[in-house]
Amino acid sequence: TKQERTFIAIKPDGVQRGLVSEIIGRFEKKGYKLVGMKMINPTKAQAEEHYADLSSKPFFNGLVKYFTSGAVVCLVFEGKGVIKGGRVLVGATNPSDANPGSIRGDFCVDISRNLIHGSDGPESAKAEISMWFKDSEITQWNFITPVYE
Ligand code: DAT
Ligand code: MG
């Protein structure tokens, strides 16, 4: 059966604070399968498209500026329940509400510097993966001993 996929991005503050391996490691150790990974400098147009749903918000310009302020690591993880489970690893949008043990709960304090993006549902996951990755950039590989059926 085809496994669910989600789009995760480590935002510029995550890269600059040396949290790339910590963040990828949490997803890997949970048992999600890394099938896409690249580092980019997002353009303003990409940031605006990625956050298009929020274009009417007062924080939109600041959000786009933040997202384009440095290198971002784009990731695709695959696995059972990975969209919802990935959001649990990420934690609440506002780091003040994020539980300890979550990435935002453990490593940040400011909603406008919250380290990481994770798709919030099946539609956004599909749209975000196809926005940030070409099909040829998703790499197929198999577990010899599956961590789930
Ligand atoms: P999430 O990233 O948890 O999916 P979201 O999709 O509602 O949250 O918003 C996208 C990003 O926008 C979020 O990670 C940080 C920023 N943001 C959201 N609400 C904000 C607010 N009230 N003030 C400043 N930035 C905000
Ligand atoms: Mg969101």
Image (spheres, rainbow, N blue to C red):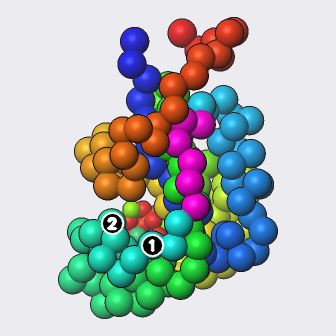
| Image marks 1 and 2: residues in contact by CB distance under 8 Å | yes
- Graded by Cα atoms within 10 Å as few (under 14), some (14 to 19) or many (20 or more), the crowding at tag 2 reads some
- Residue, far front: 136
Tell me the amino acid under the disc marked 2. His
Image spot of residue 107 (x, y percent): 73, 68
Tell me the amino acid under the disc marked 1. Pro
Image spot of residue 126 (x, y percent): 30, 43
Q: In this picture, which residue range is highlighted in magenta? A: 34-39
Q: Nearer the viewer, residue 24 or 121?
A: 24
Q: Is residue 118 magenta?
A: no
Q: How many angstroms separate mark 1 from mark 2 (CA)?
A: 10 Å
Q: Residue at x 59, y 73 (%)?
A: 71
Q: Is residue 79 above or below residue 95?
A: above
Q: Quadrant of the N terminus?
A: top left
Task: Tell me the number on the disc at residue 42.
Answer: 1
Of badges 1 and 2, the one in the foreground is: 1
Q: Secondary structure at mark 2?
A: helix
- Residue 112 in view, yes or no: yes
Query: Magenta: predominant secondary structure element?
Result: strand
Question: Where ligand 1 lies, by image quadrant?
Answer: bottom left
- Residue 51 in view, yes or no: no
In the displayed structure image, the side of residue 133 where residue 144 appears, left or right: right
Q: Disc 2 marks which residue?
A: 50
